[in-house]
Image: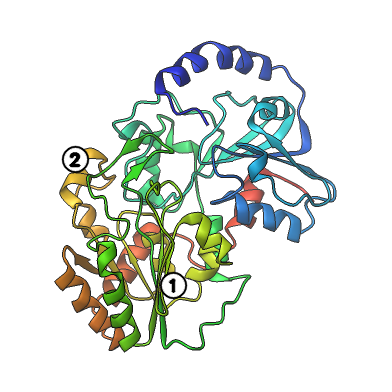
């Protein structure tokens, strides 16, 4: 993945401008589907979409190409499912009748006989994206359609990607399909409750920028506090899993697993056998912040808290898509340890003060709340079995 903004702009205005011209004249195969991920492999919305295509036998008459960052992220090849690297992706794009993106895209203008769908990686979001950020990547309008979870996000995304509102397709995210109907069931029978903490990244070597000076991997807490956290969780027989963001800087990270408290990098999380949206479909509550998972979890109608001690700094450095993002955080907003433990106490005693507010924000953010996202997206794209 290219991280240098200047190099990206130069390539867009030279090499890829020429490729866009060639793409207009290339014949497309309607039974060729390209799934392209900018980083970390077939993940985010592409993972459940690929699984849906296979489960529903779309791969019998269609060929599916999965273009990923490197061979490190190759998955298991099924019938008519092939993995390639980014270097080969352009060749397949020129021939594909249908293209789906997440976490990046190829800066090639779609032809008139091609459907290119940008699924992003967390459409319902607090954080600024695209042209709304302070990172100017230039034009990113290289798609036929983009996913929006509700009319609330249509003007936001149109402005962020400098495109017309007509390119927005209102549907829910494939990721939430998996949350609403988990494929893997985890055995948590020894605990009374399971709580997931999913902080977004503040520093990222991978992406090459920082959104906050907060350096703790677990916001509010130093590593010296972990034993105390475990004891508190043990007292209420609750398992607390902290799942670090895939882009979070973890150069000084050390795996920490206690009886009732786990701090896991993205890689450790997967090695433990967890899949985020299967897990979100089974937990009793979520601790979040500015990440899209906090909004996605509204579809579960379970207690949430928002740990946001760096709210003002994050607002200044990264920015939010809402004038007052706190108004879209239907749960206790936590700024210090005292507030954290107060909410944990209420969570343990089944005190839920934000149920009505969660439902109000959920209805603003999600038009479709029962799943079937993949089905709607494929209908718009016109892919046949």
**Image mark for residue 316:** 2
Q: Compared with residue 47, is residue 116 higher up or lower down, i.e. above or below?
A: above
Lateral position of residue 141 relative to residue 36, left or right: left
Residue 225, image x and y in percent?
Answer: 25, 69
Residue beneath the point at 23% across and 50% down: 214
| Residue nearest the observer in this picture, 334 or 323 | 334
The image shows residue 194 at horizontal and vertical percentages of 42, 79
Location of residue 154 by image quarter = top left
Q: Which mark is residue 355?
A: none
Mark 2 crowdedness (10 Å alpha carbons): few <14, some 14-19, many ≥20: few
Depicted 320 relative to depicted 304: above or below: above
Depth order, front residue of 267/78: 267
Q: Is residue 352 among what the camera can see?
A: no
Residue 89 vertical position relative to residue 338 in the rendered view, above or below: above
Residue drawn at (74%, 20%) of the image: 26
Q: Which residue is mark 1?
A: 300
Which residue is more in the foreground, 76 or 17? 76
Of marks 1 and 2, which one's residue comes earlier in the chain? 1
């Amino acid at each position: 993945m290219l991280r240098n903004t200047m190099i990206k702009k130069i390539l867009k205005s030279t090499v890829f401008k020429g490729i866009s011209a060639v793409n207009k004249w290339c014949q497309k195969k309607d039974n060729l589907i390209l799934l392209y991920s900018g980083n970390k492999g077939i993940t985010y919305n592409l993972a459940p979409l690929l699984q849906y295509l296979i489960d529903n036998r779309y791969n019998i008459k269609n060929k599916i190409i999965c273009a990923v960052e490197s061979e490190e992220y190759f998955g298991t090849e099924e019938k008519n499912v092939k993995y390639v690297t980014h270097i080969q992706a352009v060749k397949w794009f020129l021939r594909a009748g249908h293209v789906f993106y997440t976490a990046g895209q190829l800066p090639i203008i779609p032809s008139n006989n091609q459907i290119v769908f940008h699924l992003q990686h967390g459409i319902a979001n607090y954080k600024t994206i695209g042209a709304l950020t302070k990172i100017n990547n230039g034009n990113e309008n290289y798609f036929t359609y983009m996913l929006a979870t509700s009319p609330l996000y249509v003007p936001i995304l149109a402005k962020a990607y400098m495109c017309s509102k007509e390119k927005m397709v209102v549907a829910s995210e494939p990721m939430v399909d998996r949350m609403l109907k988990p494929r893997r069931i985890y055995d948590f029978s020894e605990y009374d409750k399971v709580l997931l903490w999913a902080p977004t990244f503040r520093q990222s070597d991978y992406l090459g920028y920082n959104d906050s000076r907060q350096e703790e991997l677990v916001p509010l807490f130093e590593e010296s506090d972990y034993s105390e956290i475990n004891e508190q969780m043990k007292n209420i027989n609750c398992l607390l899993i902290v799942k670090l963001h895939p882009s979070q800087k973890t150069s000084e990270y050390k795996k920490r697993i206690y009886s009732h408290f786990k701090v896991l990098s993205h890689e450790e999380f997967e090695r433990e056998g967890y899949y985020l949206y299967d897990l979100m479909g089974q937990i009793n509550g979520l601790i979040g912040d500015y990440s899209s998972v906090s909004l996605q979890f509204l579809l579960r109608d379970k207690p949430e808290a928002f740990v946001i001690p760096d709210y003002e700094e994050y607002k200044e450095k990264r920015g939010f898509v809402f004038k007052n993002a706190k108004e879209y955080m239907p749960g206790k907003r936590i700024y210090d340890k005292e507030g954290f433990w107060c909410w944990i106490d209420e969570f343990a005693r089944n005190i839920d003060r934000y149920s009505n507010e969660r439902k109000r924000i959920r209805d603003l953010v999600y038009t479709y709340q029962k799943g079937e996202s993949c089905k709607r997206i494929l209908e718009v794209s016109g892919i046949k079995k």
